[in-house]
Image (cartoon, coloured by chain):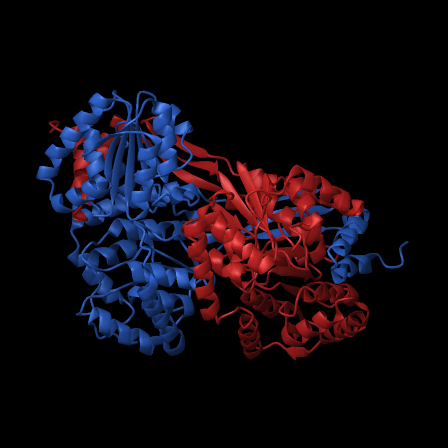
Chain colours: A blue, B red
Amino acid sequence: MRIVKLTKETTKNILENMLKRSPSQYGEYESRVQAIIQNIKGNGDEALFSYTKQFDKADINASNVKVTDGEFEEAYKAVDPALLDVIRKALVNIESYHELQKQNSWFKSTPQGTMLGQKITPLEKVGVYVPGGKAVYPSSVLMNIMPAKVAGVDKIIMTTPCNAEGKVNPAVLVAAKEAGADEVYKAGGAQAIAALAFGTESIPKVDKIVGPGNIYVALAKKAVYGHVSIDSIAGPSEILVLADETANPRYVAADLLSQAEHDELASAILITTSEDFAKKVSEEVEGFVQILERKAIIQKSLDNFGYILVAEDMDEAIDTANEIASEHLEIVTANPFEVMTKIRNAGAIFIGEYSCEPLGDYFAGPNHILPTNGTAKFFSPLSVDDFVKKSSIIYYSREALQPIHKDIEQFAKCEQLTAHANSIAVRFEGEE
Amino acid sequence: MRIVKLTKETTKNILENMLKRSPSQYGEYESRVQAIIQNIKGNGDEALFSYTKQFDKADINASNVKVTDGEFEEAYKAVDPALLDVIRKALVNIESYHELQKQNSWFKSTPQGTMLGQKITPLEKVGVYVPGGKAVYPSSVLMNIMPAKVAGVDKIIMTTPCNAEGKVNPAVLVAAKEAGADEVYKAGGAQAIAALAFGTESIPKVDKIVGPGNIYVALAKKAVYGHVSIDSIAGPSEILVLADETANPRYVAADLLSQAEHDELASAILITTSEDFAKKVSEEVEGFVQILERKAIIQKSLDNFGYILVAEDMDEAIDTANEIASEHLEIVTANPFEVMTKIRNAGAIFIGEYSCEPLGDYFAGPNHILPTNGTAKFFSPLSVDDFVKKSSIIYYSREALQPIHKDIEQFAKCEQLTAHANSIAVRFEGEE
């Protein structure tokens, strides 16, 4: 891996380079996605099944679009029992972490007769999109569904493309059932997003759509945003490791590579205060790359978006980590908890030598759907909060409203909203 | 107001009618907004000032784009002291309510040496857009800024269009200063949103943009979403009153009109279980309309989107209220708290005869920026949560990782991510 001295200029260039990973030439895709959405909105199932025939080569209709109990049973028979075993173990941790995120409704009252509060209500129906294709990630199915389940969503509706024989990947089906999906439909791409957003004869309209997907799925989600809610739009994966000379270079190298293998746009960055350590990690990386299965992808990802940066001191390293705002941040220093307190921007923070990123991907419990490409500056990991909404609660008695009623009328009049003022005044008519 | 018997068909028609208020013919606007965004992105201040000249007829440049201390002083001299007084009173309540929304970072640890948690960090820079034009709402300035202030945002940057003389409305400036805006810039429309999203020589790039605006502002916010975060996109205002025969028809009529005066697209709906009460409210409405200043707007709004619906019983009334998912919901029944427990979908819920909607608009403390047009099914009132983000915290000791390391490797291998498996395995090399 290239070793670069960290300067303001280096950081600027890296940030610009990483942003190149966001697709910007949307033009042609956007109009195709809009056409698909309008067609689904207008023609429902008929349009949906026709796209499924066109894109997935499958004959799907109202009688086989929904995955049946029989198909779930088949899926259970088809998956490796070892996978089912780890899915169940992981789910225990994922559920118990997300339980900690649950918020209560609350109120504050006063003896004058006021009550103000915030009521939390789970969303009624949620759509979870699971991409098809070669890379199948049952762990992502768990991570998308479990927070909705814990939030108390009434109905979790999953859609995923089927193959030409009309079959859905068994690992995906098993993960969906174990995590608690209520219904699974065979639909993929922008047409599935449109079906969830507007509903068709077969697929129910939902309140929110979550889950990753290709450029068509991402653009369709952005297009229906506002009509329904969506989670944030997923980008290529990243890891940033902050390490000093006390870290184990072999572990750090292995962790960098675990992200680089995701795809050619993935980014793996080490920031260290030790030049000697930088060299050791680079050597370990070279060694590992030769023996790893996804060598070709890893090499491209490292060439394009991999860096080992040598900082003057830990403060400079931390500042740069905050600027990059990585999806995953590992802290492997003499005092990792101390460093953690200085981190503002990161999707998930892994503390210490044994808290490597795959622990979080699969097992520890926190969600692995995290803000990417610098968006950790303002977005959060997928959580139970994404599947509830709040209503304000306002109660004032006559006695509580009386002493302030003139103030409210005054404010409304200043804004030239006299019917607002009247709504208050009418309650104290004839009192002066 | 028209009185209609509530049926499934009525509800369906009303919902369809209300959705007509969402602009759907975006085409022409969208390409103009895209052009503005690209121009600001490429040419910064130069493009910004040229749009300000074109749209606001003002000569703005780098030396006068930022509101000065002197301009704030002038504004304080220009505003009605009565307005300043109620702004200050309202801010006490708004601040103390939003303080209750603050969440703590938390963690859970085990003696095996694990710590999982969620770290809350305020956003660093936030942009608040305040529209110009005739309707000036200092209360909205307070409601946009205060939750950001309470959240602990480092820098709150406001933009608002100036008039042809380069002056900003004094009430807006005073509200901004009182609520705690750090900097105010003279910029409006899609160009202001683009400037906040990408930064120019004069205007800093922010992490999130909030605040209402016209169609250009709304489309610009949607276009920059993902590059920065945004609040939800605001629509026309609504009130829904749930009332039985115990309610005061005069109060309810006044409350319906307080929303109808906002604009011709505003909607005011009463659902009641008493036909007699329905008639009384309708009569009171006719009486009030004649004497209210914004009569013309109110009449159009009532004709287009005003309804008095008579339900069979309170359960039917509540179901319909949940389907409509109104921005503001008043409950004026014999047992309003009981009814409140059955409400799933509403932006703010006003309980009882003296909790009228303007109390919430100006004074009680909860935010008046609320989800509109049915989006209360999945969006929430603007809150402190909108101005913070979360990072997951993951720490495992060697002792905690050891017993589960094979499980994680297994899961990674099932997903064909062997570098993920390697990251775990390398930590236990030579142990078997």
* Percent of width and height locating residue B41: 42, 51
Judge by depth and name the residue closer to the eye, A347 or B132: B132
Residue A332 against residue A119 in the figure, above or below: above
Indicate left or right for B393 with B14 as reference: left
Residue B114: tell me if it is visible: yes
Judge by depth and name the residue closer to the eye, A123 or B189: B189
Q: Quadrant of the N terminus of chain A?
A: top left
Answer with the quarter of the image where residue B117 lies: top left
Q: Quadrant of the C terminus of chain A?
A: bottom right
- Name the residue located 29 percent from the left edge and 69 percent from the top edge: A66
* Percent of width and height locating residue A205: 42, 67
* Percent of width and height locating residue A140: 29, 50
Residue B366: tell me if it is visible: no
Residue A317 against residue B64 in the figure, above or below: above
Give the number of marks: 0
Judge by depth and name the residue closer to the eye, A270 or A152: A270
Indicate left or right for B158 with B39 as reference: right
* Percent of width and height locating residue A265: 24, 47
Indicate left or right for B352 with A38 as reference: right
Answer with the quarter of the image where residue B400 lies: top left
Judge by depth and name the residue closer to the eye, B165 or B259: B165
